[in-house]
Image (spheres, coloured by chain):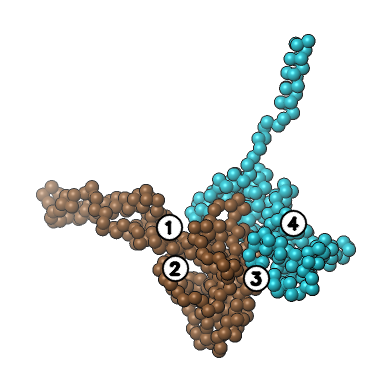
Chain colours: A brown, B cyan
């Protein structure tokens, strides 16, 4: 049985650094919601520059303020106005207690980027998990790794028996951690392991992990009722998701047999 | 007579004040670490908080020593992390014993196995769930370097379960099938610990 970690950047070997490839559900969902709530740029009309103040011919004028200079001053005035608008949009979000969300027009002002398009800026030196705040106790990460490995093998074997002629499967592994700050750092627990998809011999070869994860990530922003999974192991079958108390993160694993 | 009594009490007070150590007020190690923003997503903020954590660790805060060692381990600096863990253990920090125990048991040096086992046992006996779970898992795993011992595995898995580690439920049934009498396994804890120590290092038999 061979396991590979699936990420939006491509596949990785399943090893004890798996924690760097987990997707934190809450922060990604929050980022999506903030993007939706962000006021439209065109809605911010309050500008100190009168729209008519810059009107006028661009040809050479008797006072030697020629067209090029005039166009230049118009553009720089537009830049300034744009900056004022950007700052105002960021301020409004800030005073509402929200982070300012980057977009193509305001990228320079934005401290973070949306999590549904995680890129180099959020995954700089310390890896994805560090960037999104799923830094866990090293000891706990080791224990979880051993548990996930063993349980993933068990469920993959069940999937092999269930899906005839299959060559592999995709598993989503959910962990949960207390949201409150703890002296010794986060100590997550395994929440569930679900078989997301069975892979046939052909689909296993053609499987595009980047596309698959991008779809999964964008679906986090549009939660919808999904059918009960056919194959799932829940550590505590009675326990339901509690977003108030716990944060959740997902690891995607591809298994091949 | 009264003067004598007043004089004696002043002397006693002065002596008492001299003996008490007012230069080092009780430190709240937990608060010192809690005040740091180690979950910051801003790399520059995070780095500065880690620098503060290092200062706390260097000033003998055992929790900070554990957390700083944890940061170093996440960066892959095992050699730098171990001295901090050892200092923290010397100050009585069981989380550090747990972490160093796991590092020793998982490394390739056979000489560290016994110390790793003893540290993990110490942490598990103090009630740390991760150490209990690791020991419970390890004694029946082929990949673990500790000798196989289903009774000890059952002992620690049931302790971890009682301690609220739900993951123990995933393994405890399989392990209990491997032992004839679960009650006996709980009773024979000390005996099994000695047996494992003997198997790791025959000179300790």
Label 4 residue SS = helix
- The correct choice, above or below, for A11 with respect to B56 in the image is below
Which residue does the numbered mark 3 point to in the structure image?
Answer: B170
Q: Do circles 1 and 3 both sit on a common chain?
A: no
Q: Residue at x 24, y 53 (%)?
A: A45
Q: Residue at x 67, y 59 (%)?
A: B163
Residue A150, image x and y in percent?
65, 73
Tag 1: Cα neighbours inside 10 Å, few (<14), some, or many (≥20)? some
Which residue does the numbered mark 1 point to in the structure image?
Answer: A112
Which residue does the numbered mark 4 point to in the structure image?
Answer: B125
| Mark 1 and mark 2: Cα distance apart in space | 18 Å
Label 2 residue SS = helix
Q: Is residue B124 visible in the rendered structure shown here?
A: yes
Which of the chains bears the disc numbered 3? B
Closer to the camera in the image, A13 or B32: B32
Label 1 residue SS = loop
| Mark 4 and mark 2: Cα distance apart in space | 41 Å
| Mark 1 and mark 3: Cα distance apart in space | 39 Å
Nearer the viewer's eye, disc 1 or disc 2? 2
Closer to the camera in the image, A85 or B33: B33
- Residue A220 tag number: 2
């Amino acid at each position: 049985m061979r396991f590979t970690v699936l990420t939006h950047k491509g596949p990785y070997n399943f090893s004890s650094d798996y924690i760097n490839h987990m997707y934190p559900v809450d922060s990604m969902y929050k980022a999506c919601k903030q993007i939706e709530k962000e006021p439209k740029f065109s809605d911010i009309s309050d500008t100190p520059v009168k729209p008519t103040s810059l009107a006028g011919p661009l040809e050479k004028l008797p006072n030697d303020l020629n067209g090029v200079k005039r166009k230049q001053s118009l553009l720089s005035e537009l830049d300034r106005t744009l900056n004022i608008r950007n700052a105002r949009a960021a301020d409004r979000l800030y005073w509402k207690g929200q982070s300012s969300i980057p977009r193509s027009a305001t990228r320079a002002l934005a401290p973070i980027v949306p999590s549904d398009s995680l890129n180099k800026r959020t995954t700089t030196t310390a890896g994805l998990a560090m960037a999104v705040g799923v830094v866990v106790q090293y000891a706990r990460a080791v224990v979880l790794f051993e548990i996930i490995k063993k349980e993933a093998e068990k469920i993959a074997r069940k999937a092999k028996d269930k899906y005839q002629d299959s060559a592999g499967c995709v598993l989503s592994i959910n962990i949960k951690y207390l949201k409150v700050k703890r002296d010794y750092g986060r100590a997550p627990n395994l929440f569930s392991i679900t078989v997301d998809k069975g892979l046939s011999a052909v689909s296993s070869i053609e499987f595009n992990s980047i596309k698959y994860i991008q779809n999964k990530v964008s679906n986090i922003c549009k939660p919808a009722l999904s059918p009960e999974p056919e194959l799932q192991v829940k550590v505590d079958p009675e326990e339901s998701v509690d977003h108030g108390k716990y944060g959740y993160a997902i690891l995607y694993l591809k298994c091949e047999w | 007579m009264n003067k004598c009594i007043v004089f004696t009490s002043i002397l006693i007070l002065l002596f008492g004040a001299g003996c008490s150590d007012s230069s080092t007020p009780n430190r709240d190690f937990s608060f010192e670490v809690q005040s740091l923003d180690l979950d910051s997503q801003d790399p520059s903020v995070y780095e500065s908080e880690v620098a503060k954590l290092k200062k706390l660790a260097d000033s003998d805060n055992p929790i900070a020593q554990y957390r700083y060692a944890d940061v170093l381990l996440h960066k892959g600096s095992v050699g730098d992390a171990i001295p901090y863990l050892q200092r923290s253990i010397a100050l009585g920090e069981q989380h550090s014993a747990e972490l160093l125990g796991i590092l020793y048991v998982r490394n390739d040096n056979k000489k560290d196995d016994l110390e790793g086992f003893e540290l993990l046992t110490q942490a598990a006996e103090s009630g740390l769930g991760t150490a209990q779970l690791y020991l419970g898992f390890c004694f029946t795993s082929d990949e673990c370097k500790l000798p196989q011992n289903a009774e000890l595995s059952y002992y620690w898995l049931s302790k971890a379960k009682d301690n609220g580690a739900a993951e123990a439920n995933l393994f405890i049934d399989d392990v209990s099938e491997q032992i004839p009498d679960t009650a006996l396994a709980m009773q024979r804890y000390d005996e099994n610990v000695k047996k494992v120590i003997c198997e790791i290092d025959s000179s300790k038999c």
